[in-house]
Every structure is written in C-alpha cells, then in structure tokens.
Amino acid sequence: MTPLRIRSLETRDVRFPLDQGAGSDAVHSGAEYAFATTLLATDKVFGTGIVLTLGLGNQLVCEVIEWLGSELIGREIEDLMANFGTVAQKLAQHPQLRWLGPHKGVVHLALASLTNACFDLWAKSRGVPLWRLLLDLDAENVVDLLDLSYLEEVLPREEAERILRDNASSGAEREGILRSGYPGYDTSVGWFQYDDDQVKKLTQQAIERGFHAFKLKVGSRDGQRDVRRAFMLRELAGENALIMLDANQQWTLPRALEMCHKLREMSPFFVEEPSHPDDIRAHRTLAEAIKPIPIALGEHVPNRIMFKNFMQAGAVQIVQVDCTRVAGISEFLTVSLLAKKFGLRVVPHVGDMGQIHQHLVLFNHIALGHEALFLECIPHLQPHFVNPARIQDGVYATPEAPGSSSDLKGVRPGA
C-alpha cells in the first residue's frame, strides 16, 4: 500500500435551513442545522469530518479546527492512525486552547470534526466502509486509537483490551446484523412545535414505513400539553410500540419528578435528558424514583470523564454518546467500552443524522456485544449527503461505500 500523506486541511461552514417546526424542542428553536466540516486531503483521496451545531457559532468551530489541525498536515494517514489515542490526547491538551474547555464546548467540537475526518480518510484510503475497518482491527489496535486518560481507575488499557478480546470469539454470531440491518426509531414525528394533527399524520406515515419506535419532545410550560400528546402518541402507535420522551434538559428535578409521575402510565421506554446535563445527583435521584423506566442522556455530555461519573453514580441507564459531541469517533469508542464495563446499553444521539453512527453501532454490536436496540432516525438532511443512510422498513441498511458516509454534496477540497 502506497503511503498517503495529508497535503491540506480546509474547513467549511455548512448550513441547512429546515422546514418550520422541524428540529424544535423545549429549549432549542430556529430552523437551521449546521455542520462545522473538516476536509483532509491527500493526493488521491480526501476525508470529511462533521460536527453538528444549530448555526450561530458554527464559524467559531471552523476557526478552531484550523488552529488544532495544522500539525496534521504532512502526516501519513497510516502512521497517524497507528497511535491516534496519543495524537488525540495531545490535541485535547493544547496548552492555550485547552483553557477554553477543557474537553468541552467549541474546542472539543473542533477536535471531533478533525477526528472524524481522520477516520473517514483512513477508511477511504483502505477502500472500505468505516464499520469494516474497525472490525478488522485487533484489540490492541483498537485501544491504540483511544485516549484513556482520567479513566485509569475504571478502564485501564489492559481491561479495554480484555473486553474486546472476550467478545471477539462470539462476534461472528452477531454478524447477521450486516444482512438484516440495524433497527431504527423515528424522532421526526414528534418535534416540539408540531401541532397534534401534524404528529398524528407523521406517526401514521412512519408506521407505514415500518417504524415501531418513536420519540416525542416534551418539556412544555403547560405540563398537560405533554401529558395529552404523550397519551395521544401511545394510542396512535399502539401498546406494543416503543415511545421515548425527550425533555431536552428543560425540567428542574422537582418538575421532572412531577411530570414522570404523570407520564408513567403511558409506559415510556425511556426518559431522555430530563434535567440539566451536568447535574449528576439530580439524574440519580430521578433514576431511583422512576425505576424501572430508564434515563437516557448524552446529547450534551461532552466527554468520557463526565460519562464515567454518570455511570458510576447510577444516574444513566441508556448511554446516548454522540461522535459529533464528544471528541469524535475515538472518544465514542471509549465511552462504548465504558458502557460495556458498567453493563449499560448504548443508543447514540444522532447529531450527524445517523450517517456516522450507522457504522459505529455495527461495531458496538459485533465487536463489543452491545445489544442492537435501535438507532435514532432524523431524515431532514439525508438529501445533502453523497451516500445518505438507507432506511428501509424502519431499518438501517448496512453502508457499503468506503469511509464514514460523511461526504456532503458539493463540499470538497478546493471547491
């Protein structure tokens, strides 16, 4: 294999207006999704890395990508990825930019975009989809991709390798998922600003497309609106459907306790982001109060150390780690290993609209033995991808094109 050297790094501030009400929740409004996009080019192929923002500030992430990524220029991709964990740790510990985090916010989003571009370029240089590249690595090579610092007392390198090796022997038994596809659930039926008639119409359409699991946005000032809509969706979807409720951090702990009590009878499969994402104690208190209904979170948990603390506290039961929120694919894999150690399920938040995560959940299931529960589906940006996720009968078809499925139409180096 001829070594491929990174010749250039470019960024793109890419924004997509959404239809009115799409993407809305109890906290976030404004019909725009945006990607702070990294383009890493060699003489033959380029890698695309994306992280999601809601538009304003996207340009700041792009600026930091250029600062952080300058030292990657001139590196051979195989050499870079052979010990990427050390590279990622060095970038995250930038002696000046670290002050703006650490390990969160604009700087961490920039690192995620860079990291995702590196993995995309690596997979394309080998001519394989990302899931295949990851599955072909042995345990030692996988752990070489990870920054395990600050996790030593919970997940030392030796244990991370052991978890991978212990599950490798049964991995072939789980490869049927590559043929059957990975189950999805539909979030786009229940955006916060949709009226009842629109929720009803979209839910029926989703059922006809083969979905059996749905998410509803809650967190209204008028709690009765949430209750009405939740029971309405339960009636529409049927008693056997899975329905998730997402408060997007809107509730205080007393409000969360009150609302979860009122919503318990419609049997939510999980309650997502019920309160402030840094309040570990509140999540633990709520988790104890609403058992056996799980708490899901991760959309705004920025790094592996925060995830470690949530897991240790028993404050999360479903881990929604997002490779466009934590420091990219590398930190996603680290959090997935942590979740395996703690016996927790992983259901990613799809800040990239499912494009990258469709690869990562296949690795999680086959290589780590995580349950193939389902993967969030938000279709609004699919027309903008060169190789959009293919969802048939409510199931993600296994991606076949080389890379991480992140290339955007019209977005390439020099263009």
Image (tube, helix red, strand yellow):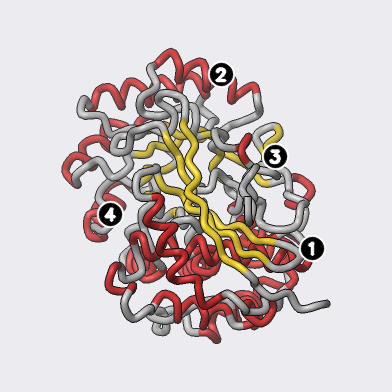
Residue 406, horizontal then vertical, whole percent: 62, 51
Q: Secondary structure at mark 3?
A: loop
User: Is there CB contact under 8 Å for labels 2 and 1?
Assistant: no
Badge 1 crowding class, 10 Å Cα cut-off, few under 14, some 14 to 19, many 20 or more, is some
Q: Is residue 146 left or right of residue 182?
A: left
The residue that mark 3 highlights is 390
Real-space CA distance between mark 1 and mark 4, rounded to the nearest whole angstrom: 43 Å
Real-space CA distance between mark 4 and mark 3, rounded to the nearest whole angstrom: 35 Å
Q: Amino acid at mark 4?
A: His
The structure residue drawn at horizontal position 53% and vertical position 48%, both measured from the top left corner, is 352
Mark nearest the camera among 2 and 1 is 1
Mark nearest the camera among 2 and 3 is 3
Q: In which image quadrant can residue 228 be found? A: top left
The residue that mark 2 highlights is 204
Q: Secondary structure at mark 1?
A: loop
Q: Amino acid at mark 2?
A: Gln
Q: Quadrant of the N terminus?
A: bottom right
Along the line of sight, the residue nearer the viewer: 25 or 71: 71
Q: Which comes before the other along the chain, label 1 or label 4?
A: 1
Looking at the image, the residue that sits furthest to the left is 254
The residue that mark 1 highlights is 127
Q: Which comes before the other along the chain, label 2 or label 1?
A: 1
Along the line of sight, the residue nearer the viewer: 257 or 215: 215
Real-space CA distance between mark 3 and mark 1, rounded to the nearest whole angstrom: 20 Å
Residue 320, horizontal then vertical, whole percent: 46, 53
Q: Amino acid at mark 3?
A: Arg
The residue that mark 4 highlights is 283
Residue 343: in sight, yes or no?
A: no
Real-space CA distance between mark 2 and mark 3, rounded to the nearest whole angstrom: 20 Å
Q: Is residue 228 left or right of residue 91?
A: left
Seen in the picture, residue 413 relative to 194 is either above or below; the reply is below
Mark nearest the camera among 3 and 1 is 1
